[in-house]
Image (cartoon, grey):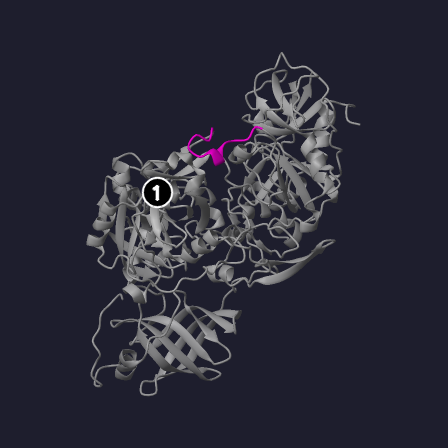
Amino acid sequence: MKNQFRCPNKSNALSAWILLLCLAAPAAMSQEGGSFQVQNGLLEATVDVAGQGIFDVTLKLIDDTSFRLVEAAPSKLGVTQNTFSSLTRELRLYWIDVKQGDVEIARYDVVLLLQDVESLSFSLLELTALEMAPSKSLQEVCNDFGCFTLQTKVDGLSDGVIDTDEGVSEKKVFWDREELTSIESAMSMPQFTDIERVGHSAAASAVVVMGDWCMNQDFDTQGDDPVYHATNPASGFFVSDSVIVTTADALRTMEERALNGTLGDTGLSLPAEFLGPNACASYSAFLNQKDSRYNLESGAGPIVQLADGRWGLGEVIWTNDESGLGAIRLKAVAKNRREPMATWAQWRGIESNEHWLQIAATDIDNIGETATLHHPNLSRSEGGWFVSPSSSLNCSGNLGSTNLYLNHYSDGSSNGAPIINDTGVVVAIVKSQTNDPEGILCPANQAVTTKNTLGPLPRYYADGDIITVGSLISAELLRELEIIEPELNSTPGPSALLNRPAVSLENFQRFEVPIMNDSFTVSGFPVAALNSTAIDIARQATVAFIRETGCPTCDENRLNLNFNVPCICTGFAVTETLIITNDHCVTELALGANTTFRTYFGQDVEAELIGKTSIDGETIMNSRYYEIFGGIVEEGVLTGGHRGDVALLRTKQKMQLTPLKIADSSLLKPWDPLITVGHPTSMNRTGPWVTGVGSFLEKNYFTRTSQAYNLPAQRGASGSAVVNLSGELVGQIAYGGVASGEEKTTTLPNKYGLFAVELVIDRLETVPAPYSRETKIPISPQVSKGAPSNYIREMIEKWAPGELP
């Protein structure tokens, strides 16, 4: 609360107003202006009463222009724009949403005038219409394989402003967490093994430990993200209703990290020059040179996010250098992380949380099946609360070891995660990761030397040679934890499967959110076509770019069936002697330089670089780009440094394969099924020639050099062919990225005629990833882009005229 007050005597000014505020029950309010429900005529808002404090109030509509105060209570918010003045008797309310049920039908700034103190009645003085937030709509997409749903907020949305003098003022669209979690799944639940079910039931006890934030505590900037920098996240778990165990490294403040040289940019907006000691304070002073609204602070305490979306603020109560672990006790909680921390509500133990895990010292020989509950950073955009099943029996390195080795992926943000046994008890905690390509520690993790045998995948998954290292719970560790938390191993509340959303968090990084059913993969590929012969056509025409030097010993009849080779990039054959890859894969190669590829059938061929778009590809956008953006556009190569990102090589020997036929990419329609085959480095343990399946997103509105797909992309898979269900080339993979970034240049202008709309993405939010039939960690972006086949054909004709059939 911003100001404290005492309940007044009835003789005080505005006695009825203040007295009712003191006696009424509290009402649940949002931090925005408020809302008015048409059905019951209730207007709810949070108001700053001059000289008295901040209150959550409810007014009842009496007639068309009159309201009466019916409920009020002190608010937990520290600041609000809404005000009441005893001098003018005016109640000013900003940004009031008018709702018919859950649907917003209007938005206003409202000014009410107090007419009668005794009855607390108000008359309508001013009403200013505001532009409404875009409402979501559902669209049905159908093809020969069935129908699914798209959820969007841009249907009927007005565009932002494009002014050749002032620049672009983009209309902002964002998804609320509630909109994500309220979507009901149209896909059936997977069949869980026993250890998977135990892991998913325990997941509500896990948390994301965000560490330290450099956060603006001035509520006037509530429209912006108040967090300017954050330390790297980790995993953790409740051991009682209030105490969380995690890795000690996650509990270091920004100052501590800066002093030992480990504070780095985590992708938020704090410039590099403000990453040393006093980083947050110095950046606050820098911002306030032009604007005094900034009150940036760090070191408030470790911040955590719970599985239900709430944010907790804690204090460090224990660290142990030997184990590398630490513990925090929560002291405050909020549903909205943008609220100033001083306004967060008090944490109330079991009233605030009833999910925690029991912990036990266990001999490694008695562990067996395990489940790790963690939040790997590599898949943060997908969500959190991943359950990775494994077994101590998979790793012979566990014999006589003080570590627990598990053959599943994790990364630094998984450290501090609980490893539970088949009864749901924590027996170890993730402390690090190690490489085991030869399977010395875990024979089950040994890399294969043949071609990938996994089926078609809608995403690429972490399937490399990294294994997880856990620190066993010792009797000594238990004794230390019992000292700081006497309630250790008390009985928690009942466990149940975590309520996971139907779609992943990454789906909410796009303007059109696809809600798939069992007829389609999450990437929009029809399940009925997973055995398409087009996959075989694409695989056998795909080649591995295995080294940047020539292969003078290569010959037509020499085969090398060892496919356990590092792949620089992927390529594909369009004739028996012509290979296409990405320009960015041959950046260091000059025209005429030689390099080596290995085909699907094991043939090593030497190839000469004969063309790349960075030299003579398309350099400018189309006429529509200049019509729309005019003088705003910057000079230079607008299609990018690689100008479509295509390169062509000619082999010295004929390749023993069937080249891809080139189809007309202009015929592609959104959500047409597509296939790609590549060599993602994250999946090198199971071998190259990994098949990805998905669908077409849309062509780029501004250039012929690029189009977008709902297909996986990852380092090593660059240069992959994209084929249709006939096995014909329709495009190429060059890059992956955030879906909304591609939609801005494809779907928005092509489908909606929008050119100045921005999707606001919460970079700190985590939402449990949906239940999946794949237990591995998804690491590829959902959307990728690359050159259309028509542009590829144009480049081939320029570099090798007459050589295409």
Q: Is residue 479 above or below residue 647?
A: below
Percent position of residue 732, x then y: 65, 35
Q: Residue at x 38, y 58 (%)?
A: 222
Q: Is residue 359 toward the left or the right of residue 570 in the image?
A: left
Quadrant of residue 6 within the rendered picture? bottom left
- Residue lying furthest bottom: 118
Q: Nearer the viewer, residue 388 or 630?
A: 388
Query: Where does the image place residue 48, in percent across and percent down from the top left?
Result: 31, 70
Residue 796 falls inside the magenta stretch = no
Q: Quadrant of residue 645?
A: top right
Q: Is residue 530 visible?
A: yes
Q: Give the position of the N terminus as an image quadrant.
A: bottom left
Look at mark 1 in the image and give the residue it sits on: 364
User: Which picture quadrant has residue 377?
Assistant: top left
Secondary element type, mark 1? helix
**Whole-percent x and y of residue 186?**
60, 60
Does residue 242 lie above or below 9 as drawn? above
Relative horizontal placement of residue 411, taking residue 561 as reference (left or right): left
Q: Is residue 241 above or below residue 751?
A: below
Residue type of the residue flagged with mark 1:
Ile
Name the residue rendered at 37%, 56% in the picture: 205
Q: In the displayed orientation, state which residue is furthest to the top.
A: 552
Quadrant where the C terminus is found in the figure = top right
Question: Of helix, strand and loop, which mostly describes the magenta segment?
Answer: loop
Q: Residues within 10 Å of mark 1 (few under 14, many from 20)?
A: many
User: Residue 566's spot in the image, x, y percent?
Assistant: 54, 26
* Closer-to-camera residue (652/565): 565
Q: Which residues are magenta?
A: 438-449
Q: Does the magenta-highlighted stretch encompass residue 443?
A: yes
Q: Can I make out residue 230 in this image?
A: no
